[in-house]
Amino acid sequence: MQLDEDWIRSRQNRLVETLAEQGVEHALLTRAESIQWLTGAYVGPLFCPSAAIDAAGRVTLVLPNRKVGTPAVADEVLGYEEKKLSTMRDASEQRHASVDAVLATFPAKTQRIGYEATSAFCAIGERLGASPVDLDAALFRLRRRKDADELAIMARANEANRAMYELARSRIGPGLNELDLYNELHGVAVRTLGEPLTYFGQDFRCNARGGPPRDRSAEEGELWILDLGVGLR
């Protein structure tokens, strides 16, 4: 499950075509999912990466200093300070530091900059010039199309779902505690994928419509509805 540079470059090219249609010279991406779609880089929820792509297709990626070596497909990778004195900076500080680093690479005379309006902090529009272009709808449309490399990761994640349901069928019965089943399901998912999950959900309750597990044991005749899903990378 290595990064597929051909598919990632294909997505970058599709975004370049969209920028040309909207007359955008540079695009600033601040939503982690969009950045992963564009570059393949995943750094987890504690950090605030950013990325940019220009009309020629050149990609700049900004990651936390400790994550600069993360596998990615980009023409330039820069770092920002995510910690001070070994203490994690809060999201607002990280977001400003990350965006500052990427905006510093933009030419001074850039006229039209596209950005993700719903994920950017409130003052960012003022820094992007007179007419920033909201790219939210365009990026959501592009991301809805799943390429072969994305589908491969989704299929791999689904192997953990299959393993969890098989385990549940063999274990469910009167007396089984919801927390115990939750722990067993998480364990088999991690073991199946061979690495920590990036998401684990959603419904684990017996005799209820759904929700997180409780310290409660199932009784005779009760229905256990499991809505299971994992995140992989």
Image (cartoon, rainbow, N blue to C red):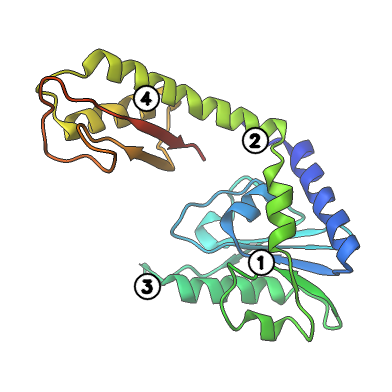
- Which amino acid type is marked by label 4? Arg
**Is 88 left or right of 169, judged from the image as shown?**
right
Placement of 78 over or under 120, stated as above or below = above
Placement of 42 over or under 177, stated as above or below = below
Measured in 3D between alpha carbons, the distance from the residue under mark 3 to the one under mark 1, in whole angstroms, is: 31 Å
Measured in 3D between alpha carbons, the distance from the residue under mark 1 to the one under mark 4, in whole angstroms, is: 37 Å
Pick the front one: 74 or 19: 19
Q: Which residue is mark 4?
A: 191
Residue shown at the point (45%, 70%) measured from the top left: 91
Which quadrant does the N terminus fall into?
top right
Instruction: Determine contact: label 2, label 1, CB under 8 Å.
Output: no
Q: Position of residue 205 (x, y in %)?
A: 23, 35
Examine the rendering and report whether any part of residue 206 can be seen: yes
Q: Position of residue 199 (x, y in %)?
A: 42, 42
The label nearer to you, 2 versus 4, is 2
**First-in-chain label (4 vs 3):** 3
Instruction: Determine contact: label 2, label 3, CB under 8 Å.
Output: no
The label nearer to you, 4 versus 3, is 4
Examine the rendering and report whether any part of residue 73 can be seen: no
- Which amino acid type is marked by label 1? Glu
Callout 1 crowding tier (Cα within 10 Å): few <14, some 14–19, many ≥20:
many
SS of the residue under disc 3: loop
- Which amino acid type is marked by label 2? Glu
Q: Position of residue 42 (x, y in %)?
A: 56, 49
Q: Which residue is mark 2?
A: 150
Q: Which residue is mark 3?
A: 85
Measured in 3D between alpha carbons, the distance from the residue under mark 2 to the one under mark 3, in whole angstroms, is: 37 Å
Measured in 3D between alpha carbons, the distance from the residue under mark 2 to the one under mark 4, in whole angstroms, is: 21 Å
Residue shown at the point (60%, 68%) measured from the top left: 118
Q: Which residue is mark 1?
A: 116
